[in-house]
Structure formats: structure tokens, C-alpha cells
Amino acid sequence: MKIKIFLFLSTLFVFFGCKQENKFTSKLNSSEDSLAIYFLLANDFNLPIEKRREYNRKAFSVIIDYSNDSISKINLFKVANRYFNMDDYHDYKKTVDIILERSIISSDTNNKSKALTYLGDFYVSQAKSDSAFLFYSKAEKIYAMQNDNLNIAKIKLNKALLQFNEGDFLGSEITIFNALRAVKSEKNNQVLIYDSYNLLGLIHNELGNYERAVEYNKRALDIINDRNIEPVYQSKATSLNNLGYVYQNMKRHANAIGFFEKGLLQKNLKTDKPFVFAMLLDNLAYSKFKTGNFKGLPEQFYESLKLRENLKLTSGILVSKMRISEYYAFRKDSVMALKFARESLELAKKVKNFKSVLLALRQLTIIEPKKASIYSKQYIHINDSLQKAERKMGEKFTRIEYETDEIKSENTDLVVQNRNLILFFSGIGILGLFIFTINTQKAKNRELLFKQQQQVANAEIYNLMISQQSTIEVNRIQEKNRVARELHDGVLGRMFGVRMNLDGLNSFQDDIAREQRKSYLTELKDIEQDIREISHDLNREKSELINNFVAIVNNLFEEQTKTYQSKLTSNIDNSIKWENISNSIKINIYRILQEALQNSNKYATANNIQIILKKVESSLVVKISDDGRGFNILKAKKGIGLQNILFRANECGGKLEIKSEKGEGATIKVTIPI
């Protein structure tokens, strides 16, 4: 009915035009009538934005002269809402500040709490999470004093969403459960419970707890299926998208596609919630691409991107461009892949979306391997800064909660003190002296309590120092072990080979022997350089191993054949796409080969060694076999060599298999998922 009245009045106004405005206005019975018209026109989305803003200002000018009563505050909230819908946040805050000031003057706690909530919404729009959290907390304290559980739950849900957006997932989960506890009757608060389960599903999806994420999203979907929420909100489409996204993260794209397609079938989705439609379409296209179904691609990616650009959804635009880049990279169109990845990186930096910056840098590392080291340095720097910022924001949220509790406590103390003052001035001299003595005693008690609290704080600081020292010691031991592995795997193996060759040349003094000794001296210089690199930068692996893995492995094999008498045969599967395999996996594979070759020559005295690197389904298999003396597996597993191989296999998320018996050679097999 309200919509029909609004359309009727809007049409009537346009019909008569500007020339009839004075005549129309003269027929208004009062300022309330003009105010109603101004509100309607300010909300008419068919009018230009400046015209709507003008009518809203007229409404404000009418209300501002009203007396400070509840009706004027209600009307001012209407003005604020319309400014918010116009994205005019400056006038929105200005209006809310006036409401808050008037509410404080008139001791109107109901409108004060509402104004504080509106200010929280303002700072959310400005991406100032800490300020938004502060004002939500202040509003929550008032609702708590009024025992308004429904508004307490709503505020807690807003705070939980802030925590989620800042990466404080565990804190967000705790806040949601507190919100659910504040709501006693589920039947009367289905929308709030739906939003809570929906957010819990998102939290566990981010934490990688996919089964829990599916459970919470299905709970949210059950609430929608009970038809307790209006279809215009398109909650079902949202939940279907969230379920599909969880399965997408689980790499179960076939299941995900079903949810995305069902979500896109929801009636009036593109009209009611175009951003949800764009999200479903983009997710559907991505899961189809991952299953090898290229029907409708890349058109669906572009359709979603265009809609997000029209809606100015920056985060959605970043996701679309990254996925389009990934699609073209898979299709071997490096030019288009590079174009969209760079656009995504530039936009992410512009809007300071550092998580998207990290994704873009990772994609560029794959597309431009020559610049991998540059992108990797940027990635590490930004990732470290982002983690620190998230920790600081979580701590800031906790501190805001604590400080608002302190303010509440201080206000309570002030009330008690004022009451005591009234009693003091209304009493007789003896009673006054008695009260003074009591207050003096209270001051002493507070001082004693402060000293006790200070002692507790000092004890906590000491425990923290002890804990930190323990952490430093653990890290130091881990770093020592890592350096030991590097020296054992990389340097000692090469020095062993050089020493054996120099020993063999000691009995020769001809020119050929001298030349060979010079080459081995050069090799010793290279080993010296390796040791220097390890000491200068413990976290850096050899760039040659990262940039040209197959060539480095072949060099290792050639060095093996020159140094030792055993016959080496190798087979590297040409179908392996080394550029898609992470640098850490390549480094660990190289060290495993190096260690295995050293064991075969140093301990097994093998005549024949066979090395195979092949792709089996979605895994990379590294297999080293020899016909040497063999060994007892149970005893050999305690040695540092096989321990290093096991450690590196685990770092890759791989599986190590060892087969050997005395006199029957040995086989080492490492299976790594890629």
C-alpha cells in the first residue's frame, strides 16, 4: 500500500511539473504534509541524485526547528537514512551527531543507543573497523542496561562481521555464539539466526573446517525453506552460493556446480540482488573451468565482471579478474593472463585490499617466472605486514571491549559517589565525620587493591617474558637443525666428491692431472661461495634451482657420472609442467636426489643407479633405485641421511616408501601431490 501511495504522489508531482509547485504547496494543510512529500521525493530513485538531496535538505530544514522530542528524532533518523541511501556520508554523520546530542540532552537512552548504532554503520562505510566496533560497543552497553536482548544480538552480529572482515575468525565465532545466547525464541528471530548461521559457515570455510561450514550453511538453508524469511531478500540464493563455495574450496567442483546452478534459478534474483547473481555466475564459471567444461566460457566470466563493474563492487571485480587471468593462463594465452593479473594487482593496491594483492602476486609469479623472485619478495613483505595488522586489529577489538566495560564501571562509581555527597550535605556534623572516615577507608582499600592488581600485572609480565624466551630458544634450535641439513645435504656431499677425486690425482703429476686439480679447486671455491650464501641468508635457496630445475638436475647427474664409477640412468617425464610446481617442492626434490645419490655411492657401493621422475595422475613420483649392498630399514631410518629425506618429503606433503634388504639393493620412492 505504501509503495502504491509513493508511486501515485511521485507521478502526480511529475505531471504537474515545476510550474505547478507553488500551487500544489499552497494546498498542503501543514508542515507535516510538506515533510511527508519531501521524504517521498528524497527516496524517489527515478529522480536525479542532486534533486533527491535537495528535498532531503528541505525536510531537514523543517525538522531542525522542531522541539527536542521523540517525533523530531524519528524524522531526523529518516533524513539520515536517506542520506545513507544516497552515499552522502558527510551529511549522514552530521544528522546523526545532532540526534545523539539531542538524545544526551534529553536523557533519551533509546534514541541515544540507536544513534550510536548509526555511527557504527557510518564507520563501517568508511572502512574504519575499530571506530565502528567502538560505537557498536557503546550502543550494546545501553541495550544491556535495558535488557533489550534482540538489539543486543543484532549489535553482536554486527561486531562479529567486523571481526570476520579483519581476519579475527575465532573472535568472530565467539561473538556470534554470544548473539545467539541473547536470543531466547528462535521463532521470533529467524532472520537474525539465519544471518548467524550464515556467518558461522563463512568463518569455518575460511578456517578450512569445511564439514562444519557445510553444516552451518545447511542450517541456514533450513530456516529459509521454512519460509520464515521474505523471498525478496534472496537468502536462499545466498546460502546456495555459500554451500557451493565450500565445495569449491574442497575441490569438489561437480557438487559445487549443482548449488550454483540451483541458486541462479531463484526467481527475480538478478533484479532483487544483482551482486548475488554476479557472484553465483562467477563461481559457476570457475567450477566449470576447473572440471574442464569450457561451455559458455569465458563469456560467463565477462558477464559477471561487467555486472560487478556496473555495481562498483571492488572486491568482486578483483575476484573476477584473477579468475579470468587463471583461465587464460590455463589456455596458454599468456598475454591476456598477464593483462588481467596486472589489472587486479593495480586495483588491489589502489583500494588497499592486501589479501587480493597477495593473490595477484602469486598469480604473476606463475605467469612471469623470470620475475618470480621480485614478486616473491613483495609477497613475503606484504604477507608479514598483513598478519601483524590482523593481530593488532584483534587486540584492538579486545581493548575496546575492555575500555567500554571500564567506562560502565566508572559511571556506576560516579552514581554511588553522588549519592554519598547528598547524604553528606543532608546529615549532621557527626554523621558527616563518620561518612568522611568511611570514604577515607575506601580510598585506602582502593589503593591496596591497586597495589594487588599491580603485583598480578607484574607476575603476568614475568610469565610472558619467560614464555617469549622459551619461544626464542625453540626457534633457535629449529634454525640450527635447518642449517645442519643444508650443510649435510648440499655442501658435504660435494666436498666428499672433490676429496675423492683429489685423492685419486695425488699420484699423477702430468699436465692433465694439474688441469683437473685446478677444476676441483674451482669447485672448492664454489663450495666456499655456497657456505657464504648459507651464512648470509638462511632463508634463500639457490636461484638456479628455482628458475631452471631440469637443467640443474641434469647437472647433478653429469657430476655423478664424472665422479663415480657407478652407471647412472635417468628418466624425467616430459609431461611434467615444472612451472606450475612450487619452488619449495623443487628444492626439496633436488635435495632428496642429492642425498639418495650420496647414499648409493658412499654406503651402498652400487654399480647401477636408476632415477625416475614421472607424473602419475595428480602426483609427482620420484624413484631412486640401486643394486648396492642394501641395508636394514629399521636401523637405517635412524640415520641423518634418511631422516633428512623423510623431513623433506613431509615438507612437500608427500609420502616416503623405502624398500631394501641386505645384498639386494635399495629403492626410495617419494610421492608428492601437485
Image (cartoon, rainbow, N blue to C red):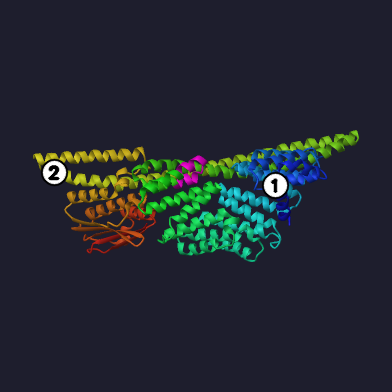
Q: Nearer the viewer, residue 438 or 563?
A: 563
Side of 240 relative to 153 (left or right):
left
Which residue carries the number 1 mark? 14
Q: Nearer the viewer, residue 39 or 72?
A: 39
Q: Which mark is residue 505?
A: 2
Range of magenta residues? 345-359
Side of 668 relative to 5 (left or right):
left
Q: Quadrant of residue 42?
A: top right
Q: Residue furthest right?
A: 428
**Which quadrant, please, contains the C terminus?**
bottom left
Residue at image coords 49%, 61%: 247
Residue at image coords 65%, 65%: 227
Q: Nearer the viewer, residue 573 or 640?
A: 573
Name which residue type carries label 2: Leu
**Which quadrant, please, contains the N terminus?**
bottom right
Q: Is residue 351 visible?
A: yes
Q: Residue furthest bottom?
A: 226
Q: Which mark is residue 487?
A: none
Secondary structure category for the residue under label 1 = helix
Is 264 colored magenta in this rendering? no
Side of 362 relative to 22 (left or right):
left
Q: Residues within 10 Å of mark 1 (few under 14, many from 20)?
A: few
Name which residue type carries label 1: Val
Residue 500 in picture, x, y percent from top left? 19, 46
From what the image shows, is residue 47 above or below residue 293?
above
